[in-house]
Structure formats: structure tokens, C-alpha cells
Image: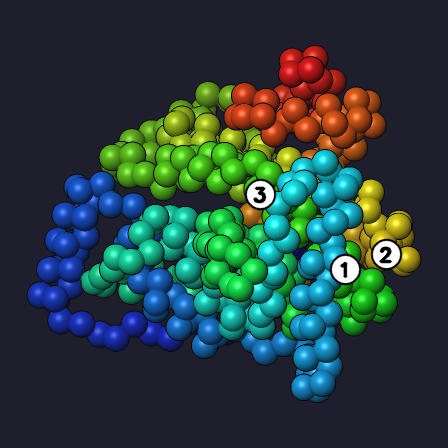
Amino acid sequence: MTEPTDVGSGLDKLDQRGGADQRGELDQRDQQEERGESIGARIDWSLAATVGKRLVRPGPKVTEYTLDAAQAELADAAVRAEGPVREVTGLADGLRVPSALVVDRRGWVDAASQSMRSMLDGDDDGESGGGLSGKVGGLQAGGLLAFLAGAILGQYDPFTPSGSDASGPSDPGVLMLVTPNIIAVERSLRVVPSDFRLWVCLHEVTHRVQFSANPWLRQYMLDNIAVLTSDAGESVTDVVARINSAVRGGAKREKGVIGVMQMLQTPEQYEAFTRMMMLGTLLEGHADHVMDAVGPAQVPTVEQIRASFDKRRTAPRNPVQRIIRALIGMDAKLAQYIRGKAFVDEVVGTVGMERFNTIWTDAETLPRPDEIDEPSRWIARVL
């Protein structure tokens, strides 16, 4: 779950290097590309974490007592939310209830950089991001992490295993809750803090349940990410030719950042991108549906929270924020919540949650682009 935030300060300049060193590092990068190394392997993730933590803005001012109390309440709420979510969804019954990772903004940057490395590189032990190109990538990734660190309320990361504890083995993913961001939003919305914290946990725990009950989702995402981040071997001329063809051909294109991706990516990459967008729309819409289904019984002020939160989501932003939101796809993310929830609401309202859960069978039962806005098509095809 994300909330927009202000843009952080600029990046520090990269150390000046000698021309021969730069040529050697560029040659090394070319050799890496020829070996088919992933994009993630070309980013210095250690530098990204360092830069992100240096640039991230501090959270709201709170006393140590208030911060400790909020952290303890969030950890408890993440556990309490599991039962109602499982009951409403009919998923993950019988599995252990793992604890959440409650962090500040700097802690989120550390965790997110590890997750992105695992997701894009798939090698937690090997070195990555060597040379000049790795540092440039690390600076860019660090700036993005710093921006997002002020926007994330909670996040389920299916790519980084949680550490083992006394209650059992490590889990396949970890649920993170960013305390200062949650405090900032609950103050802004003037809602009951305990209610808002549980409400946020209901959304994020739903994501944890989705992946715990359906382990194939993680590999499905990794497979599509591999296609998206693969080197297509295209020259700049090839890319420009495809853009010109798309513009002159008058073919129907999506709006905004999705339309840009449609032109820049190869057909195979765009298909993978579309599959990821459809999955994201389902996951977010399902989580929002569960929040509202569980909310009235668990969160006394849920109607006020939902109304205030939705108003905040769609509030006007300053020009710089609008540009950055477009570049990183946050507006597309908002559309996922809205379209996905409408899809899940209609399907569950028509066939019930038990039959809806057929959607989690495999990749073939996931909704297709023409079905998200017309759920009856999915019902006719799958059920």
C-alpha cells in the first residue's frame, strides 16, 4: 500500500575516474551483457541502500514512547489481522502465522534493496554491480528507494525470506510495516490510530495470505520479471523504428506510462508486462475487497477511514510530484486498486468467495486484460 510523498534532495555526484578506468569498466559491462547477466547484477545494491538511506527524509516528530507503542501495536495488529483475513478469503487455513517486520524509513530502504536484488538478480550471495555502470545504477536505484521510502505504508515482499525464529522455520516472504509513514498518514487523516493501523494490516496480511496459500505466484512473477529485464539485443535503431511504426500505424495504445512501455518494449516484454499488470490488479483489488469485507466487524471507524483515505489518494499533487508519479507508475498503481476491487467485488457478489478462489488455480485462471473491466467474461471462461 503506497501513499505519495515529497521528492527528496538530489544525488551526490559520482567520483571522477580516469578515462582508461572508465573504458575498462565499460568493456566489463559489455562482457557481462554478452554472458546474459541480469539487469539486477549490473546494479551496486550496497551503494543503492547507502544512497537511499542518506537521501531519505525523516519521518514525523514523535516521542520515543509514541514510536515504541506504535511499533508494538503494528506488530500485534499484523498477527490479529490474519484470522479474519483467512476466514473471509478461505485461504491459508492451517498455516502458521508469521510475525511482521516493523521498520522505519531507513530500515525499509535496507529491506527493499535486498528484495530488489533478489528479485532482479536471483543471487543473494554473489557480487553484483561492479564498475562505473554498477555505481550509476546504484545511485539511480538509491534515489528511487529514497522517494518510495516515504510513500510505503506496508508491503508484502515475496522474494526475501524472513529469518527463522523459535516458532518455526523461515517463511518464503516477509511483511513490512513502515511505522513513521503510517503515523504521518493517520495524523493527516485525523483517524483513530489503532483502527487505521489494523486497517492497513488487513490489506498487507491479505497479500501475505495470497502468496502463502498459492506458492506458485512467486515463481510466476519471477518468470515474467526475467522476461522484462532480459537483454532483447535490440539496437537504438530497432527501438526507434518500433516507436515510429506504433505512432504512424495508429494502433490502439494504452494511456500514460503503460502506453510508453507498450512502445519501448519488445512484444515479448510487453506481454510479460501485461501479465504482471493483470496480476497486480488482481492482488491489489482482492486486498482492498478483503479490507472492506473484514473492516466493519474489526475496525469500528472503517467507513471514515475508507472515505478519508480514498480522498487522499485522488487529491491533486504539485507538478513535480505528478511527473514522478507518472514516471514510476504510481498512477497506474492507483488504477490497479480501483479496477481490481471492482472486478473482485462483482465476481464475489455473483458467484461467492469459494468459487472466486478458482482464480488462484494457475496462470490460465488469472484474469485477462479484456476481463478485468468485464468480470462476466472471466466467469464465463473459467467457471
**Label 3: which secondary element:** helix
Q: Is residue 229 left or right of residue 62?
A: left
Which residue is at a point 69% across and 59% down the rendered structure image?
Answer: 78
The amino acid pointed to by label 1 is: Leu
Along the line of sight, which residue is nearer the eye, 279 or 95? Answer: 95
Of labels 2 and 3, the one closer to you: 3
In the rendered image, the residue lying farthest to the top is 380
Quadrant of residue 243 within the rendered picture: top left
Inter-mark Cα distance, 2 to 1? 7 Å
- Please indicate, yes or no, whether residue 143 appears anywhere in the rendered image: no
**Label 1: which secondary element:** helix
- Please indicate, yes or no, whether residue 17 appears anywhere in the rendered image: yes
**Label 2: which secondary element:** loop
The amino acid pointed to by label 2 is: Val
Q: Choose the circle earlier in sequence order: 2 or 3.
A: 3
The residue under label 1 is 198
Which residue is at a point 45% across and 31% down the rendered structure image?
Answer: 272
**Is disc 2 surrounded by few (<14), some (14 to 19) or many (20+) residues within 10 Å?**
many
The residue under label 3 is 212
- The answer to whether mark 2 and mark 3 are in CB contact below 8 A is no
| Residue 336 x %, y % | 65, 40
- Measured along the vertical axis of the image, is residue 339 above or below residue 83? above
- The answer to whether mark 2 and mark 1 are in CB contact below 8 A is yes
Render colour scheme: rainbow
- Measured along the vertical axis of the image, is residue 345 above or below residue 22? above
The residue under label 2 is 299
Q: Quadrant of the C terminus?
A: top right
**Is disc 1 surrounded by few (<14), some (14 to 19) or many (20+) residues within 10 Å?**
many
Which residue is at a point 65% across and 16% down the rendered structure image?
Answer: 382
Q: Is residue 190 left or right of residue 336?
A: right
**Count the marks: how many?**
3
